[in-house]
Image: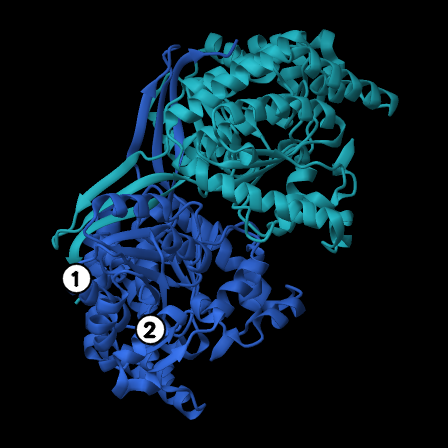
Chain colours: A blue, B cyan
Amino acid sequence: MGFLTNMTATLKSIDGSGDIAAAMGEIGRRARAAAQVLALAPAEQKNRALQLMAAAIRAQVSSILAANADDVSEARAAGVAGAFLDRLALDQSRVEAIAHGIDVVRALKDPVGNVMESWTRPNGMRIERVRVPLGVIGIIYESRPNVTADAGVLCLKAGNAAILRGGSDSMRSSRAILAALSEGLRSAGLPEAAIQLVPTRDRAAVGLMLAGLDGNLDVIVPRGGKGLIEAVVSHARMPVIKHYDGICIMYVDKDADLGMAESLVVNAKCQRPGVCNAIETVLVHREIAPKFFATTGRTLLEKGVELRCDEGALQLAKQNGNSHSGQIAAAKQEDYRTEFLDLILAVRVVDDLDAAIDHTEAFGSHHSDGIVTSNADTAEKYLAEVDSATVYWNASTRFTDGGEFGFGAEIGISTDKLHARGPMGLEELTTYKYVIRGTGQVRS
Amino acid sequence: MGFLTNMTATLKSIDGSGDIAAAMGEIGRRARAAAQVLALAPAEQKNRALQLMAAAIRAQVSSILAANADDVSEARAAGVAGAFLDRLALDQSRVEAIAHGIDVVRALKDPVGNVMESWTRPNGMRIERVRVPLGVIGIIYESRPNVTADAGVLCLKAGNAAILRGGSDSMRSSRAILAALSEGLRSAGLPEAAIQLVPTRDRAAVGLMLAGLDGNLDVIVPRGGKGLIEAVVSHARMPVIKHYDGICIMYVDKDADLGMAESLVVNAKCQRPGVCNAIETVLVHREIAPKFFATTGRTLLEKGVELRCDEGALQLAKQNGNSHSGQIAAAKQEDYRTEFLDLILAVRVVDDLDAAIDHTEAFGSHHSDGIVTSNADTAEKYLAEVDSATVYWNASTRFTDGGEFGFGAEIGISTDKLHARGPMGLEELTTYKYVIRGTGQVRS
């Protein structure tokens, strides 16, 4: 499972010396030089590169699949597990999906150069706030070859250079994909160093990235499990944009339409339980709880969901789930703080809206939370008071996603409050600068 | 000089136990509870509090001045130096300036609740991106009593709770100012914990803030010297918005109007040399250098500015500065990387615009840099290529300031690229959340 193992311990032993340090230093310098070119590259030139990249991915599908087959057999020989292998493995349609993703990014509006605001001061100075790229972005991710293309092209479109460090197990696949991306850059007259892949499996390279590559890395985006993200956060010398837990909570209010509640809870829990925007807890208003368990409760049990219930919910669940008693258990306190990523749902009966909001603030991860109610006043109070990146009224939390928001693509979903919050698209890969045009103004 | 001394060493020895830990934990919990109230407080209520605060500051001027006199005499007795004492000392007009600052913040538009963008998805879901407060903001600053009011009221207006840790030498003054702020909060029906002052001089409190107060501190803003900021950055467990160096550079192009160049260079260097947006280096195009030294060069010397010159500039400076030879020296490489904060200016003659841009990118701190030229093409190339928070064409760099930008007030000037860049006003003390209103949409 690559570089995650003992990363923290390894980082402590890095002294930054030797060949890897020299190679990583050179990667940083080349990235900075490329970023200076990209910051000024017109949208047409970046789009031309993206078009050529997609074409090269499609043309080189057999070499990409051959490289991937080598990665997969090595991983299999090392005894790697199912879900990991599934994320690593490519086939014809997954390679086409990578190429299509590049087409989608090409069609997005270029954020760079956009004048966000402008005004004239009383002394005649004209001030513009203009969107500019962040510079050099480092992405550290697990063995998912498609991220090599997704992250690389999003950074490029927003005018940034990318330094990619994928999981060791996908090294050959990533290199094959990078070859296609490099061809597109070269043919469009852009520097190949716009998208670079860390060329070694040695974990020392990650430590050198986190140390900043002599100031040539402006931000790090870790993508992966909690262990990876915590290790990056505690060692990074530059800003990190990250995604921690997705403990998402749905509240079924006393004024909920029961049919809608069932549809939303089932979708948010069962449609894809292993992702961050699936719900882990449902809160049910005491007045509607008996009807809820007779309908949605039964359906969840029939769909194989295990219910971990507080005292108020336990009896109701049992009454309605005779034939599924093995799926009903008393909840422990930690169940309300757990990202199950599985067909398990913590359940709690609450007295009122305030109790639901208090629970959500105390136990949730402020990612995506929702209310089901037909009462607009209740909904607006919930939407105002729940301090999460995304709050829903009568819709599934599963929509927290750059694609579903209409951003076209995403680099991830931020659970941070600063710089970017929620799904991150192209704009979130930029910053701004103030451009001031005067006629000789001095300060008195 | 208070808590800066050996802060790093002290932080390492903190074990977080004892009374201070309990007191700081309680401050964090009270701040979080206050932040939840403030996030929902209408603009009218916050403005009413600000009005009452300003009135209380004016009414309590004598107790504030008495507290400040005690701080000043203790500092004087401890042998504290001139500039430090000047920042610490208050008088009638400085207290009035504090009250006026509160009036200014009251008049600013409330950013909270502003719908930044909104759109409807094809499935009918309505998405809004809404401005919300950051939460609880910690400010760590030196012994400047006015910051207690400035930072506290800016945080309040943007809906945030503030935990203020001022320099130990200003403790009594800050407490007297806080008493007036608390009175305003109380009378307006807002929680007093909206603005809290760390009640101890013990540096362990700073360590506890940087450790996050059990997750009750969302962001830290350090204001002060480089030592303070570096210590905060290396120990903080939460995001830091900060200001490092202000190594600002002005480039006098071959097509500059010489009169304007003189006016801008003299203003940017001499009007207030001790601040971050004063210039530290001037770059002069080779073709205009002889005339520049005969005019601006002379004037700078007459104003007492010491010129540290590269080879190309040294001869010209000497030719035009016979009577000031003691102020002319050969520059060392590190002079171009130094924030003098004094009447010292590094000078370099450059061959062309590209050399000026390269120098600015390599040696500047990306804070505020400017070009003087009458050639619009040259100017636009410079404005596009220099990657600084603020770039000027034909205006003094001294305008980089929230007040001068029209923000009304500022919490500081960020040299970071993420979250906030350049002068930070109320908007930069907020984040956003996505509010989604549906009619039962599920993801398929």
The disc label shown at residue A274, or none: 2
Residue drawn 33% across the image and 83% down it: A327
Chain ID at mark 2: A
Q: Report helix, strand or loop for mark 2.
A: loop
* Residue B396 x, y percent position in the rendering: 49, 17
The disc label shown at residue A260, or none: 1
In this view, B343 is above or below B241: above
Give residue A9's quadrant in the image: bottom right
Residue drawn 44% across the image and 26% down it: B46
Q: Quadrant of the N terminus of chain B?
A: top right
Q: Amino acid at mark 2?
A: Gly
Residue B387 seen by the camera: no
Give residue A21's quadrant in the image: bottom right
Chain ID at mark 1: A
Q: Amino acid at mark 1?
A: Met
Q: Report helix, strand or loop for mark 1.
A: helix
Tag 1 near tag 2, CB within 8 Å: no
Residue drawn 55% across the image and 29% down it: B152
* Residue A5 x, y percent position in the rendering: 54, 77
In this view, B35 is above or below A244: above
Camera-side mark, 1 or 2:
1
Question: Would residue A104 appear left or right of B383 to someone viewing this image?
Answer: left
Seen from the viewer's position, the closer of residues B17 and A233 is B17
Question: Would residue B310 appear left or right of B120 to someone viewing this image?
Answer: right
Question: What whole-number distance in Å separates the C-alpha atoms at marks 1 and 2?
Answer: 23 Å
